Image (cartoon, rainbow, N blue to C red):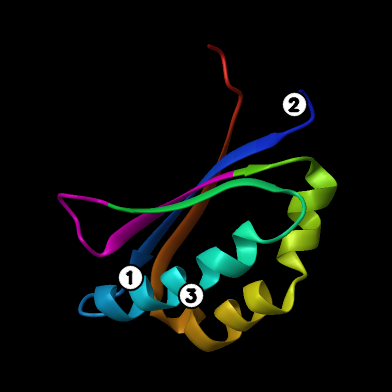
Amino acid sequence: MSNAVHLLATLHAHPGHGPTLEAALRQLVPASRAEAGCLQYELHQDRDTPERFYMLEIWRSAAALEHHRQTEHFLRFGREHGHLLANFKLTYHTPLA
């Protein structure tokens, strides 16, 4: 799994839009998990800031992640729900232990 890409996507909804963003993110999960290159795709919600969500992702390779970014379900999410986001950040991680 040395070529695997580990990342954390942090998505913060505009005030009042947390439940709508959550519903949209929940729809994204099954299709993303079904992708051949997906090793992990987990949706989490911040306990202290309920309009902030985290997607913990592991992709088999950079190519698998790039494929994910071109899928219809990912692109549809951006087209239909991107306006709900006040902030979006990706951080890439290297597992140590």
What residue is disc 3 on?
27
Give the image quarter of residue 85: bottom left
Q: Which residues are magenta?
A: 46-57
Return the disc, 1 or 2, that comes first in the chain's sequence.
2
User: Amino acid type of disc 2?
Assistant: Met
> Callout 3 environment at 10 Å: few (<14), some (14 to 19), or many (20+)?
few
User: Label 1, label 2: how many angstroms apart (C-alpha)?
Assistant: 33 Å
From what the image shows, is residue 68 above or below residue 92?
below
What residue is disc 1 on?
13
User: Label 3, label 2: how many angstroms apart (C-alpha)?
Assistant: 27 Å
Return the disc, 1 or 3, that comes first in the chain's sequence.
1
Question: 15 or 31: nearer the eye?
Answer: 31
Residue beneath the point at 75% across and 40% down: 60
User: Amino acid type of disc 3?
Assistant: Gln
Q: Secondary structure at mark 2?
A: loop
Q: Is residue 13 left or right of residue 69?
A: left
Q: Secondary structure at mark 1?
A: strand
User: Amino acid type of disc 1?
Assistant: Ala
Return the disc, 3 or 2, that comes first in the chain's sequence.
2
What residue is disc 2 on?
1
> Callout 1 environment at 10 Å: few (<14), some (14 to 19), or many (20+)?
many
Question: 88 or 64: nearer the eye?
Answer: 64
